[in-house]
Amino acid sequence: MAHTPNRAEGATRSPRHEDYERSEGCGIEAALEMIGGKWKGVILYHLLNGALRFTELQRAVGSITQRTLTRQLRELEADGIVSRTVHPVVPPKVEYALTEKGSALTPILTALREWGLRHALSTDGRD
């Protein structure tokens, strides 16, 4: 099995993201820079139970395009949140899994899911 380095090929961090590494900045803003957006939370949530192949992940996430999923995974890999493992078999087998850093998001993602079920999906928007 071959692990790719934390920084995925072709993936770069934004200049704002680099600033957070050099200063204290706002922790929430820094975290959302890495895991925010329409798809990353959903991708991470589906990886909570273990490694998935690309097509398994795409099926689990739903209406995400192949291009978008690839881009999101590269960014998560570049930030050290997801690892990409290539197994030397034919046909090639590539799996994505949470790193230790990504696994640290488990209670956050679980709480966010519960909050969404309780508040965002309620019929009247109130408790």
Image (cartoon, rainbow, N blue to C red):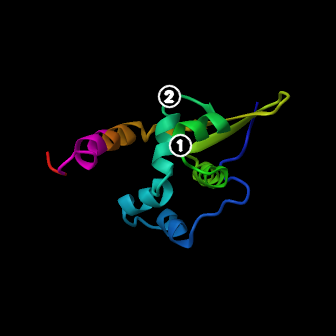
Is 50 in front, or is 126?
126
Left/right placement of residue 19 relative to residue 82 reads left
| 33 inside magenta stretch | no
83 lies above or below 69: above
- According to the picture, the residue beneath numbered tag 2 turns out to be 49
Residue displayed at 36% across by 59% down: 28
Which image quarter is the N terminus in?
top right
- Helix, strand or loop at mark 1: loop
Find the magenta span and give its range. Answer: 114-124
Which image quarter is the C terminus in?
top left
Is 67 in front, or is 73?
67
Residue 5: where, in percent of width, then height? 70, 46
Is 77 in front, or is 53?
53
Residue 25: where, in percent of width, then height? 39, 67
Residue 2: where, in percent of width, then height? 76, 35
- According to the picture, the residue beneath numbered tag 1 turns out to be 62
Is 100 in front, or is 109?
109
Residue 77: where, in percent of width, then height? 62, 48
Residue displayed at 40% across by 64% down: 24
